[in-house]
Amino acid sequence: MVLNPVISKLAGKLVVLASASPRRLEILSNAGLRFEVVPSWFKETLDKGLFKAPHEYAVETAKQKALEVARRMPFKHLKTPDIVIGADTIVTVDGMILEKPVDKEDAYRMLSSLSGKEHSVFTGVAIVVCHEKENEEVDYQLFDFYEETKVKFADLSDNMLWEYINSGEPMDKAGGYGIQALGGMLVEYVHGDFLNVVGFPLNHFCKQLDLIYNRCTSSADQESVSVRLSHNGSHATTIVTQPPPGLPAQSSHSPSSKNSSSANPVHKVKRKSSESEVDESSWMLVNSLSKHTDAREAEFIYNTTLPLTASRGQVIELNVTEHGDTELKKEDLQRIIDLMDGFKSSKALFTASKMCVFDLLQSRPGLDAAQVAQEIKASVKGTACLLEACVSLGLLKSKQRACQKPVYENTDLSSRFLLSDAPSSLRGYIQHCNDTVWPLFSHLESAVREGANQHEKAFGKTSKDMFQDTFYNSQEAKLRFMNAMHSIAKVTGRAVATAFDLSSFKTACDLGGCTGAMAYEFTKAHPGLSVTVFDLPAVVEMSEHFRPLHTDNRVSFVAGDFFKDELPKADLYILARILHDWPDEKVCILLSKIANACTAGCGLLLSEIFLDEDRRGPSRGLLQALSMSEGKQSSATEYSLLLKTHGFITAHVRHTDNLLDAMLCIKA
Ligand SMILES: Cc1cn([C@H]2C[C@H](O)[C@@H](COP(=O)(O)OP(=O)(O)OP(=O)(O)O)O2)c(=O)[nH]c1=O
């Protein structure tokens, strides 16, 4: 192809975009590049004061984003990419660097500082080329560059600014505006690459790829630094050959050049001293990325005492710890054992919970096995085994005085999550897992063979309407199901409710909001918000039982079927754990109804487990899919594209550390 000879060179390679930006995804996929998205976990917290020029900050951040993903993938995704692309966009005005606003006031400050003036938008881009060697070693080559575009804003009145801010558009964009959408109306002129402002300088990127793939024949010719990373042991290895600002550089790079290069972190190893130069002024960035260390938590320490340097193009090899291999094998074995025994642990938890062991030991700590057996009406032998198993799982503690029988009490974990009346009780959901999910999973092989749910085999019912057949077919089953939804919503609700600034919304409607547990979390988190819970009449009539003791009247209930009936009017619709259960046709009906009920600027807050873009995790979401409901599990991008077809623009995506992720979309 003449138009994209370089892009087509990447066909067949595993190209990874280390970015959660939907704009970058769109620009690169529009250019015909095929790639996976693995958003970087690198936190954009480099000290801006340490950089001589703003673009250096953007380039360094882009590098860190790309390297974090390049380093993480062999461990977490068990595959090594061929190329990782990272980018960082910043806006600079009057010597200040503007990134994404943290709230509306911040957006106002940013936009008013841009009003009537010309400013610069810089995007730093890093391309990490990975060469996998024998022994699972990886050489990294790093290429980076930046692009500057000048943008002039018209004079903006306060009214205009606030209307724009209230559209929700500024919040995930550098400088608080999106030139490609409503923000385009604020702009008088653009000098330079427009796509650079949107987040990715495509033209410069193609030129850079051309340099890498067409012009250079050997790595030594290129403006890059190679680093070899070994990941076949318990420690990863890499060394930094070029320090961040403030530390002495080992190799010069021209400040006027838009191409600079460096390579990066990680180590805890023995090095082969013969393969490196020794230099008193050298330094090394050390990151203890041990087998227990998650890259997200890894802490970087500057260690000025290690005399190790490298220059451009030089490959440095470091050894892993001598015991790396042995440790890994032990770990592997343990992992398999944990997987084999996983079902036993689950069932022990379900049984102890069902037999009220945790409630009993909360009210009467210090009982021995015989006393517990008597209370739960079970055999002493069986109870003793169950209690000991719970101790081994960290759910109970046992104490034993000399010559006496052991006595039991709850751990902090069980007091928090396993008591019937704990604020974060998961007992209802655990019971649902025992009574409903467990029987379904015992027919997993049939489910996999048939690609269909196993309700009939597990419960003896046909499942045209799963909810009616399984969850609402008796008063008792309905209460059990509502209890399950209530407990999970109470545990996840706060993280979802506080994921975004919702102050511009006054009324919300929680579709399929069940007992209102999520709705109460939303009203707690947002004092100006009232929430209507919309659910089936059979559910609404029972919702009284779940009403919290202390509440004002900002949560109300309306009975109806969201596929058939008119939806209550609201500024914001909430869909939490709904879409994954329904087939595409039904999802389409529901989203069309929401879209029709929304005027421009209305919000849709979607909360689900978002799969990683490469569908390799999280396992909670992928295991949930095995129950073979008619719906499916999707990634944030897939949800975002789905909602786009219904006229919603994704404003923010949040991967919470809780059980559910969230996405806020605005009706265009
Ligand atoms: C100025 C401007 C920025 N932007 C966006 C591009 C970037 O997505 C964002 C700047 O934030 P970045 O930190 O560069 O990127 P990101 O947080 O969106 O994604 P990641 O860190 O995972 O790579 O601002 C626009 O969409 N339009 C604009 O006009």
Image: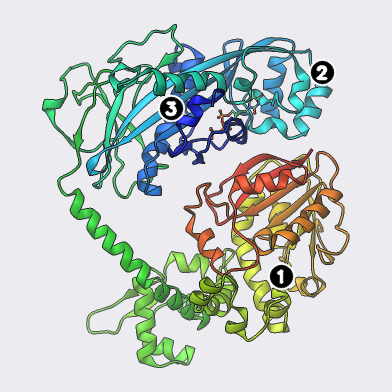
Above or below: residue 215 compared with residue 415: above
In the rendered image, which quarter is residue 344 located in?
bottom left
Q: Nearer the viewer, residue 129 or 431?
A: 129
**Label 2 SS:** loop
- The structure residue drawn at horizontal position 54% and vertical position 80%, both measured from the top left corner, is 439
Q: Residue at x 67, y 50 (%)?
A: 497
Q: Quadrant of residue 540?
A: bottom right
The secondary element bearing badge 1 is classed as: helix
Q: Is residue 394 above or below residue 139?
A: below
> Alpha-carbon distance for marks 2 and 3?
41 Å
Q: Amino acid at mark 2?
A: Ser
Can residue 22 be seen by looking at this rendering?
A: yes
Q: Earlier in the sequence, mark 2 or mark 3?
A: 3
**Where's ligand 1: which quadrant?**
top right
Write the residue at 72% across / 32% down.
169
Mark 3 sits on what residue?
127
Which residue is label 1 attached to?
546
Which residue is outermost to the left? 274
In the image, taking residue 324 as reference, residue 532 lies left or right, namely right
Tell me which numbered mark, 2 or 1, is placed earlier along the sequence: 2
User: Residue 323, percent across and down?
Assistant: 16, 49
* Crowd rating for badge 3 (residues with CA inside 10 Å; few <14, some 14–19, many 20+): many
In the picture, the disc for residue 14 is none
